[in-house]
Amino acid sequence: MGEYRAMTKVSYNQIAGGSLERLAALSDGLFAIAMTLLVLDLKLPGAAGIHSERELAQGLLLLGPRLLMFAMGFLTLGIFWTGQQTQLRHFARGDRNLGWIHLAFLFAASVMPFSTMLLAEFLAYRLALLVYWVNILALGATLYFSWRYAVRAGLLKDDVSHATSCAIERRILIAQALYALGALFCVWNTLASIGFIFALQLYYAIAPRLRFGAGSDRKSEV
Amino acid sequence: MGEYRAMTKVSYNQIAGGSLERLAALSDGLFAIAMTLLVLDLKLPGAAGIHSERELAQGLLLLGPRLLMFAMGFLTLGIFWTGQQTQLRHFARGDRNLGWIHLAFLFAASVMPFSTMLLAEFLAYRLALLVYWVNILALGATLYFSWRYAVRAGLLKDDVSHATSCAIERRILIAQALYALGALFCVWNTLASIGFIFALQLYYAIAPRLRFGAGSDRKSEV
Amino acid sequence: MGEYRAMTKVSYNQIAGGSLERLAALSDGLFAIAMTLLVLDLKLPGAAGIHSERELAQGLLLLGPRLLMFAMGFLTLGIFWTGQQTQLRHFARGDRNLGWIHLAFLFAASVMPFSTMLLAEFLAYRLALLVYWVNILALGATLYFSWRYAVRAGLLKDDVSHATSCAIERRILIAQALYALGALFCVWNTLASIGFIFALQLYYAIAPRLRFGAGSDRKSEV
Amino acid sequence: MGEYRAMTKVSYNQIAGGSLERLAALSDGLFAIAMTLLVLDLKLPGAAGIHSERELAQGLLLLGPRLLMFAMGFLTLGIFWTGQQTQLRHFARGDRNLGWIHLAFLFAASVMPFSTMLLAEFLAYRLALLVYWVNILALGATLYFSWRYAVRAGLLKDDVSHATSCAIERRILIAQALYALGALFCVWNTLASIGFIFALQLYYAIAPRLRFGAGSDRKSEV
């Protein structure tokens, strides 16, 4: 193969991949599916045995923790979808390697429904929580690696400042440190871990809205 | 974390999110899946016991109400997809907060297949109808909140008139009032509720075509 | 509600819907799912009882007709996806009514996996074939209605000639007439119906490639 | 039908199909689903019988080979998604025939979850491996045919050099030759086949990153 390649100037790896639009489209599709697959797990247990409003209410109450886990999985996927979107917006173009880093990221995202269902089914088991955390770690690690590669390979837009670049890396590192801290809580109690991680994610999704007014956001959006 | 941030000018929340195109793509994917997941519920009951055309006809007849509920879920999702699309068309740009409001909207949309299946299975139960209505309410509330936030944060296009803005808010409020009225009917009879809501949705989807000619539509499309 | 509207100049129905890009994205997502859902039905019957290459071969052979039906469903969806794409390419813009016509079209497309699985399971039943045919009829009818509406409402691009318009309408009518003829064959034998419809679809997908050279296509693509 | 057509200048086949954007969108959606469907197969065997961390660990270990097969299927789909994307980027426009070649390609992609699950369930069976290989062959063959057709029909962009065209064809042929070699190994041992194909795919996804620096990639991306 090496000799064959030497005869021409162009190798396949130099021309493959590279379209950010299609990467974004594949990602949007995959996230949309991963987010929705979770609802397939929402089945009323023992539906055949329900014969009154009261029994239906009890069935729905039993579904409560599962719905909460579903919301937590949706939140996790939403956070990483936003994170990837933020990166792609700052890339001027992609290349083949970046494509494969993001395919690895998407692989981790596609496993998330499995991790979430596992955690929902084994709420009190440390191992289920560790699987969930490893999944979050894989999402964060591939996203961090994606940014580092893009910086090194010169794929960023010209107007991306060093401060922006640092903010993106810092955000991933701090969030992953806090997730790891949350996962550590499981030595004590898995529900404490889940609570901490869920609160952390809600903070990332909601808190900024309370702290920054629309005005300051608008400025930075330019 | 606060101290860390103070050292730089750029925080992650100021640069995250914001692409309307990707939000639209994620939404289209998620709605496409939610609409199609409903068909997975269309299983012929007791298929193994069917040995004649007559038995197949009976099986399909039993599937009738379920198909109708499926059509109703599709209609609901179609209405809110149209509603979101209308809003996004009037936004000049997005920001991180708007992204999270729409992720909440999409969460409500992804729960819709579950609510629909629940209602299809427990047609005569008030609780199933209430779950369905709460789901519609969540869709309407997030969409209303999205528009209010966009107005306040200055995300609208310059050519969006005050009248347009009012029309969009009014539409959501009136529709939600009517849905709530329909849900109230379940005190009397759940089938009356379902019938009223279905008729209301058909009205929203079909009726305007009868009232406005193509000409008046064309004008307003400019 | 009527009085309320009279107070302002803008009604929601005049500003809702209208983005062809988002309609195309929703359609692509929904067709992609409907096409892929069919494969979920491909389960090896009695997988637990397979203990030799020979038994696996027998299991796969039993799956043969199902795979063929799957291919037929894929072909059907491919034909109507191409048909919708052809129409959208000739539209200058959409409006709310067109959006709802296409949502009806998408509803028919989302039922296709159900019709296909029904036919695969009840190959010899006329009723299963009629359900399949009604589904194809619904796809054709909504597509035909979409084009007629677009012509009447002036949504076509300026460069769409009358001949093009006629070709599109004619194609749908001829194809539907042939499908109806194929469905009629089931009075005699359902397998003859299925064979005729499958051959017809293969003709629509493959035959033109044999008849028109690349050169004539290129010309018409301008 | 022939006479009918003769009366007008425009036939449906001359105006149908042709939008590369919609083909890309359908492909992205379908690949996203095929990639994610695989995770549906990840079910903890005997979840009801798990009552300790140790039993959960054993259950997850049993899931190991399945997760590896899932990764392999994801990798396969990622490689062919990248391959299709590379081709589409070099096309100036599409036509109806190209659309159908890619629908055949997508059909092969949609069967991949089935082939992967079959191989995961019957790891030691040559027939399961042959089905997997035929699926890869179908993906490669349709992609090769797509490029040959595009060259012949003049659909390429003007700036696509002969060297680029040769590199794309060569890549498919070499890869398929190696896949066939790997499949041949199953005469000896199916696990050797799977190992060889997996290693080959990892090489295609990862190796180039080690060999070409970011600099040389950047150059060729212009």
Image (cartoon, coloured by chain):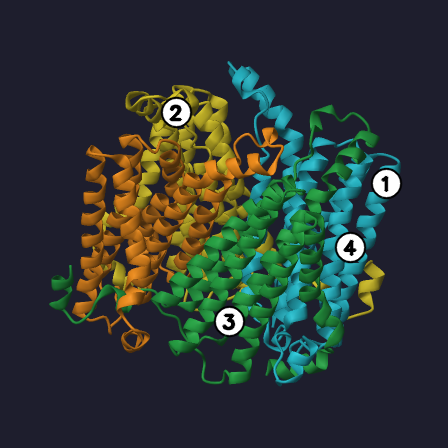
Chain colours: A yellow, B orange, C green, D cyan
Helix, strand or loop at mark 1: helix
Q: Residues within 10 Å of mark 4 (few under 14, many from 20)?
A: some
Instruction: Look at 82% across and 44% down and name the residue there.
Output: D183
According to the picture, the residue beneath numbered tag 3 turns out to be: C87
Question: Disc 3 on helix, strand or loop?
Answer: helix
Structural distance between the alpha carbons of marks 2 and 1: 48 Å
Q: Residues within 10 Å of mark 1 (few under 14, many from 20)?
A: some
Residues marked 3 and 4 touching at CB (< 8 Å) = no
Badge 2 amino acid:
Phe
Determine the CA span between mark 3 and mark 4: 38 Å
Q: CA distance from mark 1 to mark 3?
A: 49 Å
- Amino acid found under the numbered disc labelled 4: Ala
Residue B128 falls in image quadrant: top left
Specify the label residue A191 is tagged with.
Answer: none
- Marks 4/2: CA–CA distance: 48 Å
Q: Chain of mark 4?
A: D
Q: Residues within 10 Å of mark 2 (few under 14, many from 20)?
A: some
* Residue C196 percent coordinates (x, y): 70, 57
Pointers 2 and 1 in contact (C-beta within 8 Å)? no
Q: Residues within 10 Å of mark 3 (few under 14, many from 20)?
A: many
Please give the residue where the numbered disc 1 appears in the rendered image: D185
Q: Is residue B68 among the parts visible in the rendering?
A: yes
